[in-house]
Image (tube, grey):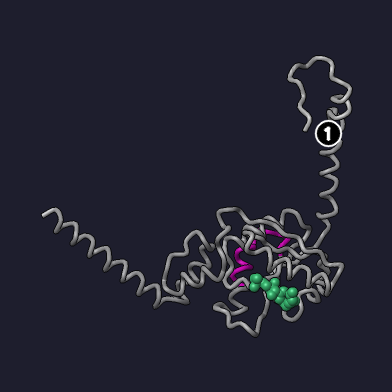
Amino acid sequence: MTHFKRNRSKPTKLQSVIAIPTPARIESSIQHRFLRGPLSKVSALYPGSFDPPTNGHLDLIERGAKIFAELVVGILRNSEKSPMFSLAERLEMLKTLTAHLKNVRIEAFHGLMVEYAKSIDATCVLRGIRAVSDYEYELQMALMNRKLEPTLETVFMMPADKYSYVSSRLVREVAQVGGPVKGLVPEVVEQKLREKLEPAYKFHDEMQGVTARASVRKERKRKS
Ligand code: PNS
């Protein structure tokens, strides 16, 4: 590692070779901006189950919308899984949530994702990586997709770290027993979960009331 002397006197021969003069630094930042150009012409597909859409999904859609010319959110019409939300519900929720993003389109697809990407002229697939645990599955999927369609590139982006533990599966698990999902999913989704799982939420709210009354009684007894 090279250590430069702090004094600003005449640079040594080595320093003059290594130090990056100001014009070169400016040039490199211009080059960086230039390199972002081609990406802004790219149409990308963000495929997933979105059952339900989470704040992590929304965060990634917003990030993707900033760097791609067009972003198609493709909801998999999966006959193998039995989803909590119907395809129509997921389409409606995602359309509402992305109405403010003019270059985002919500669609449904079935069959091979790479074939759907080709049919909509998407040349990139966007996927989110939250933690190392996602990496193996995502790598396998990206490589399989590359084998199926070598011209399709997978681009990974990280959602905000506050959503790094949020997944649709965990949201479903918490909501199925009436647990709070505030902050994990957008409000529209939270409302839909409450409607769909009304008995579970009712039971959970009643139990909370019982617990609260019991602790008031305990506190009164302690003070008396
Ligand atoms: O949100 P998910 O469930 O992680 O999304 C997975 C999805 C929909 C991207 C993946 O299962 C998929 O692309 N399915 C379509 C069928 C396909 O092309 N399978 C090969 C993937 S290697």
Q: Is 91 located above or below residue 65 in the figure?
A: below
Mark 1 CB in 8 Å range of ligand 1?
no
State the residue at coordinates (84%, 38%).
28
**Along the horizontal axis of the image, is 197 left or right of 54?**
left
| Residue found farthest to the top | 9
Quadrant of the rendered image containing residue 167: bottom right
| Residue found farthest to the bottom | 79
The image position of residue 197, as x and y in percent, is: 45, 76
The image position of residue 194, as x and y in percent, is: 45, 71
Q: Is 132 located above or below residue 77 in the figure?
A: above
State the residue at coordinates (78%, 75%).
116
Please state, as top left, top right, bottom left or bottom right, where the C terminus lies in the image. bottom left
Magenta stretch? 92-104
**Along the horizontal axis of the image, is 72 left or right of 148?**
left
Classify mark 1: residues with Cα within 10 Å, few (<14), some (14-19) or many (20+): few
Look at label 1 and name its amino acid: Ile
Q: Was residue 101 drawn as part of the magenta stretch in this picture? A: yes
State the residue at coordinates (34%, 69%).
205
The image position of residue 20, as x and y in percent, is: 84, 30
The count of marks equals 1
Q: Quadrant of ligand 1?
A: bottom right
For mark 1, what is the residue? 26
Q: Was residue 133 drawn as part of the magenta stretch in this picture? A: no
| Residue found farthest to the left | 224
